[in-house]
Amino acid sequence: MCHRPSCWIIVLLLVPYVVAEDSTQIRVGIIGLDTSHAIHFPRIMNDPESKGEFANCRVVAAYPPGSPDIASSVSRVPEYTQQIEEMGIEIVTSIEDLLERVDAVLLETNDGRPHLEQALPCFRAGKRIFIDKPLAASLVDVLAIFAAAEKYNVPTFCSSSLRFGATTQEVRQGLVGEVRECWAQSPASLEKTHPDLYWYGIHGVESLFTVMGTGCISVRRGTYDGEKIEVVGKWRNERTGTFREGQGYRGMATGEKGESPVGSYDGYEPLVVEIAEFFRTGQVPVEPKETIEVYAFMSAADESKNNGGSEVTLQSIIEEAQSQVPQRLAELEGDG
């Protein structure tokens, strides 16, 4: 054993470091067990071989309820609850019980309608929260979620896994220079309780905005190849971005330096890495402004459809929704 003073200094410096490292364990809770994400995400986070961002991030509890009027939700909850229990994750009976056991939350309820109401107690409790797609079932609730996050000073973000596809991120980082034109494709199955693209078209729209960034001015919705959805957006500086409904995930971006494929699905892990990093640091990988514009684009697409394919500005859609946010929050917060 070393008796030199320098050795003792090293030991004293190392001991607090080890304690601090052990204390960084992040206990994660899940709200909603009616989407496959609620199974895949904890399998990635809780993998005993996981390292890096996942090393100290573990799902420890889950609150199952889904939505009684969406058939896919009703059918999945019992099966997924059983799978979660088999992973050794505790099932709890309320959001309040969940929040007592965790440091951060995965809001996985497949239905966007209850997301605002489910997120509010998380914000009040100061828990960082990832809200899975769709962020909400209306632009009013999208804006209200971010307003509540700001009120309680708790960061949150929402994203499709498609945002973090490798080629999509390369183009976002400048692979082809400023993108002048892009189209992105994904399936767009509909759910009557949500605006058309919120339910599944969000994947292609998220890829599109990852490449194009903010600055969309207006959209016009039409069809192509029969009755498939096509939404063309105008961006500032005469840039154009198009969402197309189709089988599979793909797209193409054209910029000053050439073109590149975009929009691929590269699995869930790239998104889960971002979530774990967010839980650890509190730094959001997607700014609220961009997410708001994504959902305004999709809401404007519905408005365009309802008006025979006319051009609809995002500003008009956002302003109308924003006017309803104070009353929406007052109703849920008990101030109405």
Image (spheres, helix red, strand yellow):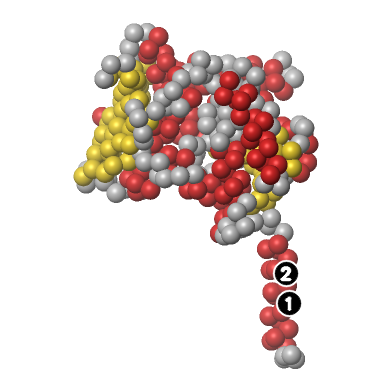
Q: Residue at x 73, y 83 (%)?
A: 8
Residue 204's spot in the image, x, y percent? 39, 32
- Residue under label 1, please give it: 12
Residue 148: tell me if it is visible.
no
Q: CA distance from mark 2 to mark 1?
A: 7 Å
Classify residue 333 as left or right of residue 162: right
Q: Residue at x 41, y 25 (%)?
A: 188
Screen quadrant of the C terminus: top right
The quadrant in which residue 309 appears is: top left
In the depicted structure, whether residue 28 falls above or below residue 48:
above
Instruction: Give amino acid for label 2.
Output: Pro
- Residue under label 2, please give it: 16
Q: Secondary structure at mark 1?
A: helix
Between residues 41 and 183, which one lies in front from this camera angle?
A: 41
Q: Are marks 2 and 1 in contact (CB under 8 Å)?
A: yes
Label 1 crowding class (10 Å Cα cut-off): few <14, some 14-19, many 20+? few
Screen quadrant of the N terminus: bottom right
Report how many numbered discs are placed on residues in the image: 2
The quadrant in which residue 108 appears is: top right
Residue 135's spot in the image, x, y percent? 54, 29
